[in-house]
Amino acid sequence: MRALVAEDHTLLREGLIRLLELNEITVVEAVADEPSLRRALTRDDFDIAVLDNRLPPGGTDEGLRAAVDARTVRPTLPVMILSQYVEPLYARELLASEHGAVGYLLKDRVAKIADFIDAVRQVAAGGTVMDPDVVRRLMARGRGGLDTLTPRERETLELMATGRSNAAIAQQMVITEKAVDKHVASLFTKLGLAQSEDDNRRVLAVLAFLNQG
């Protein structure tokens, strides 16, 4: 696997490069500012972009905006955002795509290297991985179908959005997997997602309301 890295802090950037390469993910380029990132995102020789959301020159949401713009050209481009903050506007725009291949993790909550590498690989493969805190903050802004969910269904959806399987959700909620199946089926119905063989149905369940409000 090959990665593009964008991080303005030298020590963090070098550490991220080393971490990825120790786990057999080749870093094809590492950049430190928005103009360099936008240029690098036009390359076609990487499998995932791992980006800080705030980059020079402005230090606000340059990384996120560059990722959103890049995905208008290449909708399936895998992007993993690493951030100290949740930027609701562009985060919602980035996540509101039926194509998946998006991750948003808060830096201070990435505690296990193995989990981080697994998340990078999952996003590169087309999955969606979101930090639970990001999910909660974005959900708090939702309307419509979200309001019809029970507390248990909402909790199920939050955990689903972080990439957990039904078995893992059951373990986290301390209920049976059969109970989780019922919550999932109910929230699919309430969010208007008909039965489908589409593997992205779980992602669509999350994105259906993240794009509201």
Image (cartoon, rainbow, N blue to C red):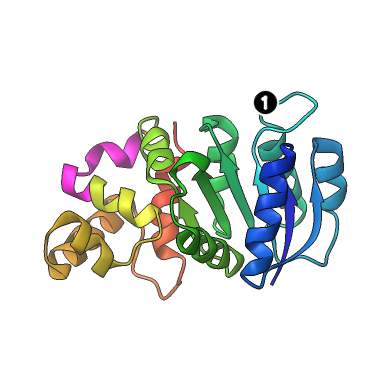
Q: How many marks?
A: 1
Residue 46 in view (yes/no): yes
Query: Is 24 left or right of 129, judged from the image as shown?
Result: right
Q: Against 201, is 84 above or below?
A: above
The image quadrant of residue 90 is: top right
Identified at 51% across, 61% down, the residue is 119
Task: Assess whether residue 144 is covered by the magenta stretch.
Answer: yes
Residue marked by disc 1: 60
The three-letter code of the residue at mark 1 reads: Thr
State which quarter of the image contains the N terminus.
bottom right
Label 1 CA crowd tier, 10 Å (few <14, some 14–19, many 20+) = some
Identified at 73% across, 33% down, the residue is 55
Residue placed furthest toward the bottom: 197
Query: Is 203 left or right of 26, judged from the image as shown?
Result: left
Q: Against 190, is 25 above or below?
A: below
Q: Main secondary structure of the magenta part?
A: helix
Q: Which residues are magenta?
A: 143-153
Residue 68 in view (yes/no): no
The image quadrant of residue 100 is: bottom right
The picture places residue 184, in percent across and down from the top left corner, at 25, 60
Task: Assess whether residue 128 is covered by the magenta stretch.
Answer: no
